[in-house]
Every structure is written in structure tokens, then in C-alpha cells.
Image: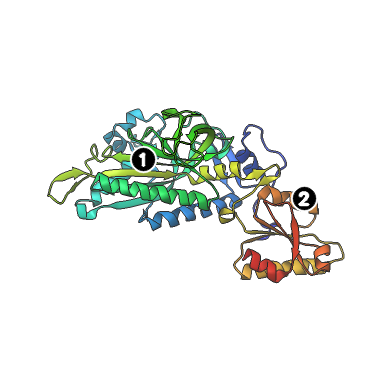
Amino acid sequence: MKQSQLFTKTFKNVSKDDTSANAQLLTRGGFIQKLGAGIYSFLPLGLLVLKKIENIIREEMNVIGGQELLMPALHPKEIWEETGRWQTADYLYKLQDRQEKYFALGATHEEVITDIARKYVFSYKDLPLYLYQIQVKFRDELRVKSGLLRTKEFLMKDMYSFHASEEDRKEYYEKVKKAYVKIFERCGLKVLVTEASGGIFSKEYSHEFQVATPAGEDIVYFCPNGDFSQNKEIAGKKTGDKCPECGKTLEETKTIEVGNIFTLGTKYSNPMKAMFIDKNSSKKPIIMGCYGIGPSRLIGAIVEVHHDDKGIIWPEAIAPFKVHLIVIEGKEDKKIKDTADKLYQDLQAKGVEVLYDEREGKTAGEKFADADLIGIPYRAVISKKTLKENKIELKKRDEEKTKLINEEEFIKYVG
């Protein structure tokens, strides 16, 4: 992609209403645009990142047997009444159509997925079943803040599992736990797998996947050996206590929650009569589990962890492009532009994703500042200096040093 043609602009300053690093940097870098409190558009650069995160999630969900579907964002009142949540879920956006029928905008999809299951699952032979979607969610959030970390509209990957036995559900729960850790690692995050209450979705235990950062709004007690982690809200432990697994002294940190997994049991299958016939010909409620990751929230968390005073530092697997190619032209040096054009074509031919800054009227300083702000992993510069030595100036975004290498080495390095 040529940067002169990319629908984006960078900004030195943006509104001070959003003070979080992710809101500031993603807006300044041209990744997102705020429409209203807790409501954001994803611009082309931001959507590229979002789609890469989605694809990582899909790959890991498919590995553990997940099948993707897509459920409606508009839910009739009646389905929420079956579980009693139409009256109790104060986070719902409710609306009425011209026929005076009531609906909710989907804040979560337990009722909808259970309705699907009761129409397709009849026997233990139909189980287990693992269904997931990546879908927009709407919640009447009272504490909108911190850019993409707490919004009214957001993207969610929610998976639901259906089982004939509690033992089978527990076994799958552990599979998802491992898959989640892998997802976050691939996105450049190290997570604390943290014990937590079931919250509004379950009365039983759950696990949160927490990322340590000073920007976090949760507090977690954790073992430095990685053997134990517990959310402060339900903690039976405190800072300075011994880890129940290894005896190491527990520490405290602020965190951002980037995912969670819940035990649902028969909380929804019982009131909605989602039943199956077991091996003994007895009718029983389907046992369920729920597993969520917010891809849009994840972007915010990644930026909070991976940035410096110049801008974003994208992990390579989710960066919008792999290489930021910059041409620094002298007025008389057409050969510089021709060399950069050729390198751009060669990189594309090798399948390397490249953003080519061939903009005219921009100084080297302006182009470098934009590159640092946007945060693409590798910066490649073609200039009078590099042309003289028949080399390319290479710099990694997370390093200060630059080095000169030839084109063959460069393509091999970034390919």
C-alpha cells in the first residue's frame, strides 16, 4: 500500500478527553476515530490489526474443535424473558419497533445460542458441541473510559460449549484455557491466568486472563513463578502471603482483563428447556460453558503494553504491515525513487506486507515521526546515503540502532 493513497492521517495532538495511551496513540496514528463516548470507528489501519487478531483467534478456536457461526445482534424480548434477564440485565439497550414489539441489542448471546442448541441437540450422540462467533456487542456501560478498554459497542469472540457430563465440560474448559494463553502469546501478551468469581454470567468459579500494566483497572495477587493468580475482588490471599502451590511470596499488580472463561452448567439450558436424551434414555439438561475474548479491547490492551514516547510498537503477528518503506529523495536524484519503487515491488512479489511512504513534500523527520507513531515492526529507508553504498537502512521499531544491508539480505530478513 502506498501511503499517499492510504485513507489515514496522523495527528500531533488529539482531544485530551481520552487520556489513556491507547486512545491517544490509536487516534493520533489514524487507527480509530471516536464518534461518541465509548463508540469508535475502525479506520483501514485499525481494521487491518483487528482482522489479524480475529484470524489468530479463529485458528486457535478451530484447533480445539470450534465451529464458527454468526448470531443476530437484534434479540426479541421473549428470549430474554425465558431466563428472567429482561428484567434483571440493566446493561441492555432496549428498543421498540413500529409494530410495538420490544427488542434488545445483543449484550451477550447465551439465550440465542441456547435457543439454537435446543433445536439441534436431542441426544448424547449430538454432544459435545463447540460453537463460536465474532460479533458486535452493545452494553449500556456507565463507566466509559480508557479508549477501547471500556466502550458501549465492541467486538467479542464468544464461544459456547455443550456437554453431556460435567467431567467432559471440565476437560474442555482446560483445553480452552491453554488455547487462550496461546492466542495472547501470539498477540504479543503474557497473561496471568487468574481465578475470579463467575460475575453476572455464572455463580461458579471462572478464570480471567489478565495483562499486567500500570494502566490496568483490576488488581491481581500473583505468584512470580506463575503458579497462582487471584483477582483482588474475591481474593482469599493478599500481598506478602505465600503461594499455595510453591510457597513463593505473592505480589500485587494492576492488570487489564483481556479474556475470561465461565462455567454455565445448566443455568440457561434448564429455564430454556435445552434437553438431551442420555445413554440411559433419561432426559437431562445440556451442560454448558462460555469463553470470551474481546478483539477490539485486546487492541487497546496491546497498545497500553507495547508503546513508547514516540508511538505504538506493534507485535509482528498483528501489525498492519510488516515493513514501512520510506524514500528520502534529493531533488536531483530520480534514481533514489526508482530504487525505492523497485524494492516496493520486490517486497510485494515476495508476499511481504509493506506500507510505502512515497509522499512528496514531507521531510525525513516528518516521515520518521509518522513511522514511529504508526509502529510497524521494520523500517526500511532508501536515501542518497544508502544509494551510494547500494544498501538499505534497516531499523526495528523496538530498537534504536540502524544497520545497512543489501536488498537480498533485507528480503530474507523480513520475508
Q: Earlier in the sequence, mark 2 or mark 1?
A: 1
- Residue projecting furthest to the left: 281
> Where does the image place residue 5, in percent across and percent down from the top left?
67, 58
From the viewer's perspective, tell me whether residue 2 is left or right of residue 64. Answer: right
Nearest the viewer among 262 and 295 is 262
Is 333 drawn above or below residue 274 in the view shown? below
Outermost residue, right side: 332
The percent coordinates of residue 375 (x first, y second) are 66, 50
**Residue 97 appears in view:** no
Task: Give the quarter of the figure containing the N terminus.
Answer: bottom right
Q: Residue at x 56, y 52 (%)?
A: 49
Q: Residues at badges 2 and 1 in contact (C-beta under 8 Å)? A: no
Residue 355 drawn above or below residue 121? below
Q: Residues within 10 Å of mark 1 (few under 14, many from 20)?
A: many
Circle 2 or circle 1, nearest the eye: 1
Residue identifier under label 1: 262
In which quarter of the view is residue 244 placed? top left
Q: Is residue 389 above or below residue 374?
A: below
Viewer-proximal residue among 46 and 81: 46
Residue 194 vs residue 387: left or right? left
Q: Residue at x 62, y 44 (%)?
A: 26
The residue tagged 2 is: 366
Residue 23 image point, x, y percent: 61, 39
Under mark 2, the amino acid is Glu
Please name the residue shown 34% across and 37% down the image.
Answer: 99
Label 2 element class: helix
Rounded to the nearest angstrom, the CA distance separating label 2 from label 1 is: 48 Å
Residue 44 seen by the camera: yes
**Residue closer to the observer: 335 or 414:** 414
